[in-house]
Amino acid sequence: MEKNIESYLIEKRVFKAPRSFARTARIPSRAVYERLYRESIRQPEKFWAREARELVWQAPWKRVLEWKAPFAKWFIGGRLNISENCLDRHLTTARRNKAAIIWEGEPGDRRTLTYQQLHREVCRFANVLKRNKIRKGHRVIIYMPTIPEAAIAMLACARIGAVHSVVFGGFSADSIRDRIADSGAVAVVTADGGYRRGAVVPLKKNVDDALTGETSIKRVIVFRRTASDIHMEEGRDVWWHRELEYVNADCPAAPLESEHPLYILYTSGSTGKPKGILHTTGGYLVGAYCTTKYVFDLRDEDVYWCTADVGWVTGHSYVVYGPLANGATTLMYEGAPDWPEPDRFWRIIEDYGVSVLYTAPTAIRAFIRWGDAWVRKHDLTSLRLLGTVGEPINPEAWMWYHEKIGGGRCPIVDTWWQTETGAIMISPLPGATATKPGSATLPFFGIDAAVVDEQGEEVGPNVGGKLVIRRPWPSMLRTIYGDKTRYKKQYWSEFKGSYLTGDGARRDHDGYFWIVGRIDDVLNVAGHRLGTSEIESALVSHKHVAEAAVVGRPDEMKGQGVVAFVTLKENVTASPSLKEELRKHVSTHIGAIAKPDEVRFAEALPKTRSGKIMRRLLKEIASGRTVTGDTTTLEDFNVLARLSRGEE
Ligand code: WTA
């Protein structure tokens, strides 16, 4: 952490918001930002109520906030429906025939759905859900490629008050099984497959594997995407397109209480089991709507493209709910950025005239490596605004993005937030905030962010500490599904009344936030969160493994790489093939993203006297180049451990 703080301290470049941009922006200057921010902190309820009134409520709220720390309720007494706010409310305006979703599949197939068409498809699929006995409050797993039907399924659940839980298409059968068990879901919506780098991802097969044995799942609805040969289980599985034949497009949006659950999204924490982050209706919508409006400063003419998969929170808030609530045109792309060639993104931007691009630093680093020639082949002058999310962006990658993609004219919004926060928390506003490469800059309206020391005291400029949020905000998580105790303990127990983000940060003399990264046992691999203990649990479930410790090491492309130290059970021989087997084992248990980059065998793991694994030591070893050549060599940590124990 200290090292990062040092390196960022030398970053001196500042980029003012371009005047041409500021002229038309909703927040046109730093002064206007300051004024609204002050109001939002002094009178948060006034600020949020004004934003909420821009949306459609079927019954008005009686109170804006009820805060019984750490449990918040927003817009109490209000009734609304998110799908109505994302769809119906645009149908009485000129947006009726505007593109809501522009989609491109990896093989090159294209579809555009206007707001009217999307509304119709959502209503029909909502009726399919009802026909299949899915009711308000039921949990539904969505395991799909990034195709319009993923958004349709989410919005259809929201329309009838079913709670969706989207599982990223790269996760394995075991991960689906865990999420079904934890959420008690009654149905899965999936596809026969999805395209990734020219191959078909066997989504339905993974669902079948997840459903062996006891399960709460009664129905699997399958969308035909790849026409692959799949198994359909009689009495359980039905085809999406067949079901549509039985329904009409008349489905009024259910009037839901503001605190009605909208979705559960599983994310990694510092224990072995992913946490089901629960978001509810009114507050979440207000957060997603209002951050999209101000941070991307969307216009009706924009073609807005957030490259995230719908399986991540960014896909929820900034591919689906935020843009549609704003009546924007949101572009979805199904596949890989380097398929068939490394210029796929730039081709898409040129073909559709994309004006706002929101992507991840890990993708930017990959583009840099693939070379500028791919970028130069395309006309990117339609772009007016760029964004990043998912991990700290190193200043050099920021500069490349600014110059090579933004042509030096587009502001960059480096947005810091989390699955738990539901919406952007710290970010520049493009017409108001001068940016510094590598800094997420200033807090969004209503967000009381601070950097504190171990005692919870706010630290001075350029001192590193823990990033906390000192008051509730509308789109905050409400709990960890089924585990209030863990919710309290994980996020609210360290500093009374403050939400602990798990990130380290510092603020500079201008009050700008510089996020350093996770300070808990969570890795950030290519912008994806992975709990080290989750990977350890997977390793230990292998019959030959006695103990495992997983740490991160710096990785130029992925931000962090995964290194696993493993001790084997007695009489098991270390071999390169066993290493490969263990890497595969993690992949089948969690998903390919969690696959260790390196497995190292050890005689024993270095431990403190109280038996805690000395991760700091392992991290040093993992990042160093101490072991080369034959990587099956057993590492004997006993000596190292004895040496380091003196410092404990
Ligand atoms: C990291 C993704 C630095 C951070 C929306 C956070 C960032 C975790 C940024 C959440 C950023 C996200 N700068 N770090 N702009 N954005 N992070 O839940 O460590 O997948 O805690 O949500 O990503 O990851 P999650």
Image: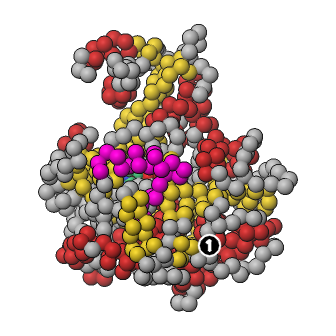
Left or right for 583, reference 302: right
Which residue is tagged 1? 159
Mark 1 neighbour class, 10 Å CA radius: few under 14, some 14 to 19, many 20 or more: many
Tell me the magenta residue range: 474-496
User: What residue occupies the far top of the structure in this picture?
Assistant: 571
Q: Quadrant of the N terminus?
A: top left
Residue 255 among magenta residues: no
Camera-side residue: 207 or 69? 69
Camera-side residue: 27 or 520? 520
Q: Secondary structure at mark 1?
A: helix
Q: Quadrant of residue 239?
A: bottom right
Task: Give the percent coordinates (x, y) of residue 415.
Answer: 35, 60
Identified by mark 1, the residue type is Arg
Left or right for 49, reference 151: left
Task: Give the percent coordinates (x, y) of residue 416.
Answer: 35, 57
**Residue at the image point whose x is 64% and y is 40% from the top:** 174
Q: Quadrant of the C terminus?
A: top left
